[in-house]
Amino acid sequence: MKFKSLAIFLVISSVFLTCILSIWKIMSTLQGLNFTNLNITQVFLIGILLSLSSVLISNKINHLIKIFLISFSFSILYFYLNEESPYWYIVGVFFISLFFTNKLKKYNMQSLKEDFISEKIIFDFVTLLGIVFFAFVILFPFYIMLVTSFKTQIALLVNPLDFSLDFSKNLTELFKSYFVIFENYNFGRYILISSAVSIGTVIVTLLFAIPAAYSVARLNFFGKNFLSTSILIIYMFPAIVLVIPLYTVFSQLGLRNSIFGLLIVYTATTLPVAIYMLQGYFKSIPKEIEEAGIMDGQNWFGIILKIIIPLSLPAIASVALYVFMIAWNEFLFSLMFLDSPKSFTLSRAIQYLSGDAETPRQYLMAGSVIVTLPVLFIFIYFEKYLVSGLTAGSVKE
Amino acid sequence: MSDSLSKLEKRTAYTLVLPAVLLVFAIVLFPIFANVWISFKDIQLKDIRIPEPRAKKIVKSISDSGAELKVIYKLRNSSLIQEIRNVQFQDKFPKKISPTNLDPRCNFKSKKVICDFGNWEAKYRENFEIIVKNIDGKKIDKKKIKSQKPILSGEANNPLLTINFTLKNFKKVFYENNFVELLLTTFYFTFFGTIGAIIFGILAAQLVNQNIQGRTYMRGILLFPYVGPVVALAYTWTLLLDPNSGTLNALLVNFNILESPINLLGQKYITMSILGFEFKLRLALTTVIFFEIWRYFPLAFLFILARLQAIPKILYEAADVDGASPIQKFIHITLPQITAIISILFMIRFIWNFNKFEDIFLLTGGASGTRTLPINVYQQGFAVSDIGMGSAVSIVIVMLLLSFMIIYFRLIGKKANEV
């Protein structure tokens, strides 16, 4: 029994170490290091040795000294067994093994005798492995997007794996793609248009949604139930089935290529979500507060403006951020309605840029970074609000 | 008293709700019904403009002194299929300049030439000439004549509003459009995209729900693909997967995992052999599905995580006392608690994947076996420029969506009520 769990422990911990070291090797290869072999078997075997020594030493010596000693000897061994590698790479290996041996702290010959220990070991390491896997898979494309925007076409053709940044060049050289897309491709204008459309959509949506949500949440009128169920069903209808009729009507009315046309469409498509989210929050505000307002002689307008809005600022903030994100990221309608470069939004401009096969990829990626950064910053800064917005509004995209 | 109050309440309610309802009606509901109308019409993208009479003005001198000019109007009907009725023409000339030998359809009154051209059939063209003379015999300023634009007007039917219908579009959708393949691709994409997103969502939620350091950061990072703009992410992936100089292929070749690069987004099939069985995998479609999963599993993750965090800790503690293993705890405690949310997620994601356009359009443009119904709407309506056909495909989408919703509410709606 003990040997079975020991074997499972050794194998799975070593698999985990092999995975992290492979990712480290891949990331280093992308810095221009010339590795051509992942050496999986070798790392796996050393990993077993490492885990075994950690379990055998267990707590006979101080934990810090132990992990330091094991990691140090592991790094030396790794250095001798491997192709020549620069010192920073080995330092990375050292820190990874430090992290790894630290994770092994709670396992010793004693704990391997516990009930269900092999399942627990698998759960523990699969959790760690999963976190490393998810973080890598999600962040890797963003990383490639960012570093590609700093490279040049020629450098990437010579070695598509070398993403190292040359800081010895001056900053104008490094940020050249950004200068080019602002100067030659008019991205300054597109940023303005995208911001105007998105902020405009937020304002107009709130202007329409707050009164409507209030009346759905509080007032009694004929057709109210029908309205609130149809809001949910309207969510489900996709933009793609609206596109052809809207295109024909907008063409005849001359609303294509206009920011105003885009604003109307964005507002109408985000309104159901906004109403749905807001009315849920309005219902949670105690009625007594409003009744006090009515006693003071407020009319409905006053109640909304002076009582409802100040009390539901968090909900309004999450609706606003959510609507902003949808409008900023929107692509389908901007593709259909905008075909003059004068009225492009950022997303449409990047798509237009990619239509020309001659456009160097670093310009495309610089544009992508520009359109992505604001949303990510807003998301990180206001995560709390946005997450509640996402959960409530995610009936819709 | 209370009666008048409730009347007031109703009136206020309607004034508050009406603007939003009207806007949504105009932009969302009206197009869905308009699709039905358009789908029964034989109409192309170039036909949607209302026909209008047009004139191009050319000025030529015909005498040496320049006192006599020939003004040519190239008249035409802008539409190739519709007539314009009762075309009126009007052009203004400077003082002391008057036309000679004026066309019988026209007359000259207070410096204006006014003509009644009657009806113009489709594709109508005419070179209409007026010869003008300066009464003083001085040279006429040609630029001044040219800068004056003629005014034309006429009555025409809006091609969208004519009452001739055809079943042609629907016949084409079902018989000439590879309909079965289209439907299969759509369902393949939708089904695997949905299942994949939910599975990865459960895994990620289970991970973040453990007691690990930095789980708030992890939750933020996991949502990145969902909040990022689709254009940027799709192009990054295209670049990453590019067969010639894409990072992924270069890495795989560099570490000798692949012999030669694979065109993950441009190759329709790849032959794989597992345990001696050879089968063909839809390669480009699978890649697109993986992108889809990557982008939308965060949503499933967010929902499931919220549910997981609401499960009472006592349940797990009781299981520990009973000596349950981690797997038993997952199967008997966690899974039953999240089935309701998973079925809701399944419906939402299924419907939204079914409607997905941007992701596929940006990655492959619908080539190499990734043509789904929404992509087909775009291709028919804007690439082939057959608006009627595009609308017919939209109608198919709407019908399928409605049937999904009905099935869903019949099957799961009742269960959800019971729970």
Image (cartoon, helix red, strand yellow):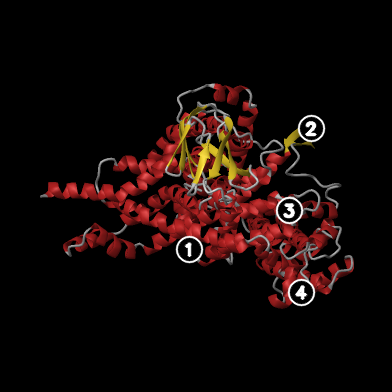
Q: Amino acid at mark 4?
A: Phe
Whole-percent x, y for residue A337 in the image:
54, 46
Relative side of A353 to B215, left or right: right
Q: Seen in the image, is B315 located left or right of residue A375?
A: left
| Along the viewing direction, whichever of A160 and A96 lies nearer the viewer | A160
Residue where numbered disc 2 is placed: B278
Task: Name the spot of residue A325 as percent of width and height, x first.
Answer: 51, 57
Q: Amino acid at mark 3?
A: Leu
Q: Which residue is mark 3?
A: B240
- Give the percent coordinates (x, y) of residue A198: 49, 58
Marks 3 and 4, how far apart at CA: 24 Å
Chain letter of disc 2?
Answer: B
Circle 4 residue? A167
Horizontal and vertical percent position of residue B408: 46, 35
Per the rendering, the mark at residue B42 is: none
Tell me whether the residue at label 4 lies in contact with that at label 2, contact meaning CB atoms closer than 8 angstroms.
Answer: no
Residue A42's image quarter? bottom right
